[in-house]
Image (cartoon, rainbow, N blue to C red):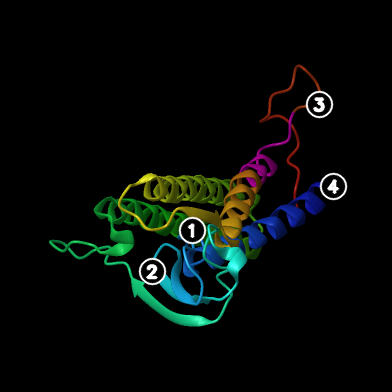
Amino acid sequence: MQKKTKLKLTIFCLVVGMFCMFTAVVSDHWAVLSPKVTEVNSTCEAAHFGLWRLCKKNLYITDVERIGHSCGPISLPGEHNCTYFRHFTPGEESEVLDMTTQREYSISAAAIAIFSVAFMILGTICAIAALAQGQDYIYKPAGMFYAFAGLCAIISVEVMRQSVKRMIDSRETIWIEYYYSWSFACAVSGCILLFVCGLGLLLLAMPQMPRNPWESCMDSEPEQME
């Protein structure tokens, strides 16, 4: 496969990764939380949340077979109420998930996700500059920025995973079951594509390896991508 074709494929994968990561950051379906159903013909409160807000939904349960199982599915009709996380409001206690520690996890995940978005923007600026000026060496910082974005996204995903696990294990919560939803899948896909393809773009921008043992990388002929 020619280097130009590899470059186009890498950039396409990076665009897909950025789209997945942006979708995950702005959406609020990272995890769905459910209490146990104890009676029928009554409502139970399920929830889903992301980096910025928590949405609770009161679902009316009529199916007898749901007793003893989790409330849901979340797609059932019901009263919907969303509350934004008060990330950066000092001196206030957070009521999110009925746990004060959840606020700390939420702040950490959101802040790291912002760094990931910033690295993606910087990488895109470098990639556009490389395409516009025809200077292949600019792909090196672009690849590094994309790899850093993927690394930050991986950390953000892990922080959110630990947040859900800690909340479910708490004795104070009403939610006993959970599953990761499509926003979490987008975040995982985005971080993998950004990290792997960022490293790939960095390798593609490196000088051509010498064909003979007595040559150095500086002596070998430059290989243009375009």
Q: What whole-number distance in Å separates the C-alpha atoms at marks 1 and 2? A: 27 Å
What amino acid type should be assigned to the residue bearing mark 4?
A: Gln
Q: From where the camera sits, is residue 226 visible?
A: no
Depth check, mark 3 against mark 1: the one in front is 1
Q: Residue furthest left?
A: 91
**Stretch in magenta:** 199-209
Label 3–label 1 contact, CB within 8 A:
no
- Kindly identify which residue carries mark 1: 122
Label 2 vs label 3: CA separation? 56 Å
Q: Disc 4 and disc 1: Cα gap in Å?
A: 27 Å
The answer to which of 81 and 215 lies nearer the viewer is: 81
Along the line of sight, which residue is nearer the eye, 87 or 117?
87
Q: In whole angstroms, how far apart are the C-alphas of marks 3 and 1?
A: 34 Å
Distance (Cα) linking label 2 and label 4: 46 Å
The residue type indicated by label 1 comes to: Leu
Label 2, on which residue?
53
2 or 4: mark nearer the eye? 2
Q: Which residue is mark 3?
A: 211
Dot 3: what SS? loop
